[in-house]
Amino acid sequence: MAGLTIAGRSFEIAPYKLGALRRAAPHIDAINAGASISTVEGMMENIEHVIGVLAVGLTKIDPAMTAETLLDMVGIDDMAALSTALTDVLQESGLAPKGEAMAPSEPQTAGA
């Protein structure tokens, strides 16, 4: 299960089933459309969409953790945690690739 740690508190984020995906889809689509982060307004719009995605999974575990509640808790220094949590929940839900495992390295042979 994906997790998020902000403001000294840790939260679990439930992976998405189809109903949760439907609620998160507008936010995911907006993130994928690439809101401009060159302005404060654009940055806030993008953050609100990330929070909107995460709130879908957070409220499944804790109904009090709405997007508004999360937005009030998050500071600028929490952006990396939000990004990591977004990636994790999308991967766990099958919406983003988990990446490829590294190939084992070739053993060194003596005298080579």
Image: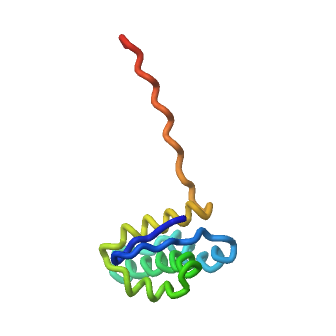
Taking the spot 69% from the left edge, 72% from the top edge, the residue there is 18
Q: Is residue 27 left or right of residue 45?
A: right
Place of residue 19 in the rendered image (x, y in percent of width and height, measured from the top left): 68, 77
Q: In this rendering, is residue 105 above or below 72?
A: above
Q: Nearer the viewer, residue 29 or 36?
A: 29
Q: Quadrant of residue 107?
A: top left
Considering every residue shown, the one lying at the far right of the view is 18
Taking the spot 37% from the left edge, 75% from the top edge, the residue there is 6
Q: Nearer the viewer, residue 33 or 59?
A: 59
Which quarter shows the C terminus? top left
Place of residue 105 in the rendered image (x, y in percent of width and height, measured from the top left): 45, 30
Considering every residue shown, the one lying at the far left of the view is 77
Place of residue 89 in the rendered image (x, y in percent of width and height, measured from the top left): 54, 66
Which quarter shows the N terminus? bottom right
Taking the spot 46% from the left edge, 88% from the top edge, the residue there is 68
Taking the spot 56% from the left edge, 75% from the top edge, the residue there is 57
The figure's colour scheme reads rainbow
Q: In this rendering, is residue 101 above or below 74?
A: above
Place of residue 66 in the rendered image (x, y in percent of width and height, measured from the top left): 50, 86
How many numbered circles does the render carry? 0
Q: Is residue 45 left or right of residue 75?
A: right
